[in-house]
């Protein structure tokens, strides 16, 4: 349960300051929703990883399906070397068979490979979809081989083609560089470069705007029109920052952030966002009589860092009669 709470329940730390949440949890001051989600995530983690782990690996984990699509007869997979292991027999019986001049394999049918498998696969029946390539059967088999004085590697990373070569008495070979592996290497490299580019060029600020649904607009007594928005600002830096919120596409518009009194020289509000956090503001945009030309006008909300001048924008619309 402790492992489930640490690995599952800890997911709540992604949605707020981790140290603040943990402090409030242990002092009993956290919101009930935090305790509720820690309980739900701990329960699901304990159930899936502690009780249903075999079913999760077989039916829910995507890795076996991906593996089956990527592999071929020259791919290195956890493999039972049939040419060496068959026919199976206990140690005593194998010695008796050898004494009679009969072939005897190294597999003593101890079932250790099956017992340690998290999905219950008998690797001796060949590569199967539930196999997650963890290699536990390799370690278990090597331990048994050490105890009975036989060479390791009865179960090892090998290819189907090499098994066929050994059965025919031919030389085995490993072709790590072939068209399939070259293609995979190129694809993985391209994805890695793309991820690196996105990480290096990522912005340290962002803004999202959500227009009010009801009412869509408000007709003012003086004849003007006002629209309401929820503006969420994201600050990815570890210092508090101030942003000027401006609106483009609506000449003469008056922009007000509820609860904020500071304004820039151009009259637009100044919004403060704490370090490494997001903050929502209620923003009202109003125009005087005749200040709109269509029932829906495209507008752009822009936040500009007061200190550095960097900016981020989000598109939305202004509704009017």
Image (cartoon, rainbow, N blue to C red):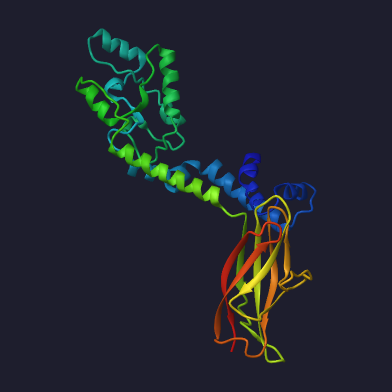
**x and y percent of residue 21 in the render?**
73, 50
In the rendered view, would you say 223 is above or below 85? Answer: below
* Residue at x 59% of width, y 82% of height: 319
The residue depicted at 39 percent of the width and 17 percent of the height is 152
Residue 61 seen from this side: no
Check the image and name the residue furthest to the left: 168
From this view, report whether residue 187 is shown above or below residue 282.
Answer: above
Place of residue 76 in the rendered image (x, y in percent of width and height, measured from the top left)? 34, 31
Q: Quadrant of the C terminus?
A: bottom right
Q: Is residue 218 above or below residue 4?
A: below
State left or right for residue 21 relative to residue 195. Answer: right
**Position of residue 298 in the picture relative to residue 83 (left or right):** right
Q: At which x and y percent is residue 116?
A: 46, 30
Residue drawn at x 64%, y 51% as measured from the top left: 14
**In the image, residue 289 above or below residue 61:** below
Q: Quadrant of residue 281?
A: bottom right
Q: In which quarter of the image is the N terminus?
A: top right
Report the residue at 70% width, 51% height from top. 17
Asked whether residue 125 appears in the rendered view, the answer is: yes
Residue 62: percent from the left, percent from the top? 42, 46
Instruction: Residue at the far front: name it.
Output: 265
Q: How many numbered discs sit on the rendered protein?
A: 0
48 sits to left or right of 80: right
Q: Quadrant of residue 100?
A: top left
On the image, which quarter does residue 263 sit in?
Answer: bottom right
């Amino acid at each position: 349960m402790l492992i489930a709470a640490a690995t599952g329940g800890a997911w709540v730390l992604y949605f707020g300051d981790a140290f603040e949440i943990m402090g409030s949890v242990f002092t009993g001051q956290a919101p009930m929703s935090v305790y509720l989600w820690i309980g739900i995530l701990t329960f699901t983690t304990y159930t899936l990883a502690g009780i249903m782990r075999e079913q999760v690996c077989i039916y829910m984990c995507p890795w076996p399906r991906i593996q089956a699509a990527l592999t071929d007869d020259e791919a290195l997979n956890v493999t039972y070397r049939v040419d060496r292991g068959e026919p199976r027999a206990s140690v005593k019986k194998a010695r008796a068979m050898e004494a009679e001049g009969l072939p005897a394999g190294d597999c003593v049918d101890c079932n250790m490979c099956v017992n340690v498998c998290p999905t219950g696969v008998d690797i001796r029946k060949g590569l199967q979809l539930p196999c997650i390539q963890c290699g536990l059967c390799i370690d278990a088999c090597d331990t048994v081989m050490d105890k009975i004085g036989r060479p390791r590697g009865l179960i090892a990373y090998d290819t189907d083609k090499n098994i066929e070569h050994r059965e025919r008495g031919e030389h085995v070979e490993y072709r790590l560089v072939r068209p399939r592996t070259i293609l995979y290497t190129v694809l993985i490299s391209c994805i890695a470069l793309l991820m690196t580019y996105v990480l290096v060029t990522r912005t340290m600020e962002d803004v999202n705007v959500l227009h009010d649904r009801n009412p869509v607009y408000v007709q003012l007594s003086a004849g003007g029109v006002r629209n309401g928005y929820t503006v969420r600002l994201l600050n990815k830096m570890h210092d508090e920052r101030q942003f000027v919120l401006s609106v483009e596409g609506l000449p003469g518009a008056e922009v007000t952030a509820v609860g904020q009194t500071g304004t820039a020289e151009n009259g637009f509000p100044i919004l403060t966002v704490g370090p490494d956090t997001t903050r929502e503001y209620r923003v009202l945009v109003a125009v005087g009589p005749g200040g709109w030309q269509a029932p829906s006008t495209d507008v752009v909300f822009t936040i500009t860092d007061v200190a550095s001048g960097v900016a981020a924008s989000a598109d939305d619309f202004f509704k009017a009669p």
